Amino acid sequence: MFAYYLDLGLRSLKRNPVLTALMVFGIALGIAASMTSLTVLHIMGSNPIPWKSERLHYVQLDNWDPNQPYDNDGSPPDQVSYRDAVALMEAAKADKQAAMFKVSYPIQPANPEVKPFLALGRATYGDFFGMFEPPFQYGSGWDHAQDTQHGRVVVLSKDTNEKLFGGQNSVGKIVRMNEIDYTVVGVLGDWKPRIKYYDLTNGTLNDPEEFYLPYTTVIENKTQSTGNNSCWKNSEPGWEGYLASECIWQQFWVQLDTPAKAAEYKAFLENYVNEQKKLGRYPRPMNNRLDNVTEWLVHQKVVPKDVEVQVGLSFAFLLVCLINTVGLLLAKFMRKTGEIGLRRALGASKPQLFSQHIIESGVIGVSGGLFGLLLTVAGLWMVRLLYKDYANVARLDWSMVATTVLLAIGAAVLAGLYPTWRACQIAPAAQLKTQ
């Protein structure tokens, strides 16, 4: 019977092409507006590394000003000081751990046809690559020995390798940065997390770095961070004074493979802070945090409030479109009262008539969904065009494609419930008398 009702619905829609086009366009417009904003919200709020997000934890320690909290809500600083980062690395209490910060180096290509350029990089430890699992096109990351020995090694991004070596396997080749030669040990493949979750402080939607260097090597070079740097009191002059200060400018991640290890690490952090308090540091009350990836995204409010508001407004617009569709469907079905009365007189039951017209509404929903999908793609393209920062999140994935079509069908069927119910209440005798 479904095929029969589908055929009847298609024929009915062809008889009123203008009315059908208005309903399809109305649903498509509402779907496109809602799905464009919902897609951005979905991508920004989704788990960037779901297979291990519960095992990756971001460390926060409150070494801030005793007279006022770092944040108005009482949250501890979102970064740690150099002295704390080094102390936690040396303690080595986690399965994997990586202190890191953002740097900027001029690169002097060996190829004279490539002009020198300034590149953004990351100073980190070798565990970074095992923790966050970026794919490698060539080679691999460096080992613990290179961390210990302040190795002059580098991992390049795919784009940087393309620029310097034409995309060839550059492992073993030399890259000169800031007048120092580094040996390439690895080249990353395509790796562009839609949310830069490992460094939310310095740009939630920024692209990953162009190169990666051993943390100890960058510190040995006396290279300051080009990322966020906050201090609540003046440091002693010079590089050593800066390293010994309470300034926060580093991110610190640990991998803890079991809940028991996470509990042990929390206890370790409390003991560490208590020991630092004895040395005159950490004047504020104990306020450590060890968020996993999803908790860290929530606490950092990765999804802006205006995106949530836009989703609400777009679904309100979809509701207006559905109300208009209800009116158009009601007008369409009421114009078929003679046909409906005749079918009732020939033995068609109310459930059969209901099924026929709901399927007709579903056809409108499918058409509106497919057209709305095209408009959604266009809408996301406009978002990327107008807001460069949203380039990685304003993109459809398969879950959003399925949601778009299902939402359109559901919306059309919902809009068709009342008109269909009204159509099924038509008395066949009264209609036949008027014909």
Image (cartoon, helix red, strand yellow):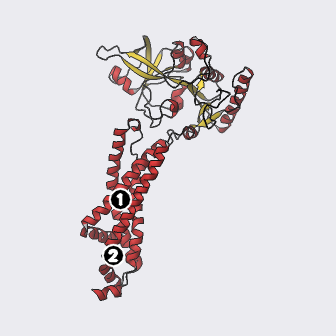
Report helix, strand or loop for mark 2. helix
- In the rendered image, residue 158, in percent from the top left (x then y), is placed at 39, 27
Examine the rendered structure and indicate whether residue 96 appears above or below residue 353.
Answer: above
Which residue is most to the front? 67
Residue 406 seen from this side = no
Graded by Cα atoms within 10 Å as few (under 14), some (14 to 19) or many (20 or more), the crowding at tag 2 reads some
Q: Residue at x 40, y 66 (%)?
A: 415
Q: Quadrant of the C terminus?
A: bottom left
Residue 43 in which image quadrant: top left
The residue type indicated by label 2 comes to: Met
Graded by Cα atoms within 10 Å as few (under 14), some (14 to 19) or many (20 or more), the crowding at tag 1 reads many
Q: Residue at x 58, y 28 (%)?
A: 79
Which comes sooner in the sequence, label 1 or label 2? 1
Examine the rendered structure and indicate whether residue 323 appears above or below residue 171.
Answer: below
Give the numbered dot on residue 158: none
The residue type indicated by label 1 comes to: Ile
Determine which residue is flagged by label 2.
Answer: 334
Residue contact at pointers 1 and 2, CB within 8 angstroms: no
- In the rendered image, residue 413, in percent from the top left (x then y), is placed at 40, 65
Determine which residue is flagged by label 1.
Answer: 27
For this view, does 333 lie left or right of residue 70? left
Report helix, strand or loop for mark 1. helix
- In the rendered image, residue 433, in percent from the top left (x then y), is placed at 30, 89
Q: Quadrant of the N terminus?
A: bottom left
Residue 338 seen from this side = yes
- Depth check: give the residue in front, 38 or 354: 38
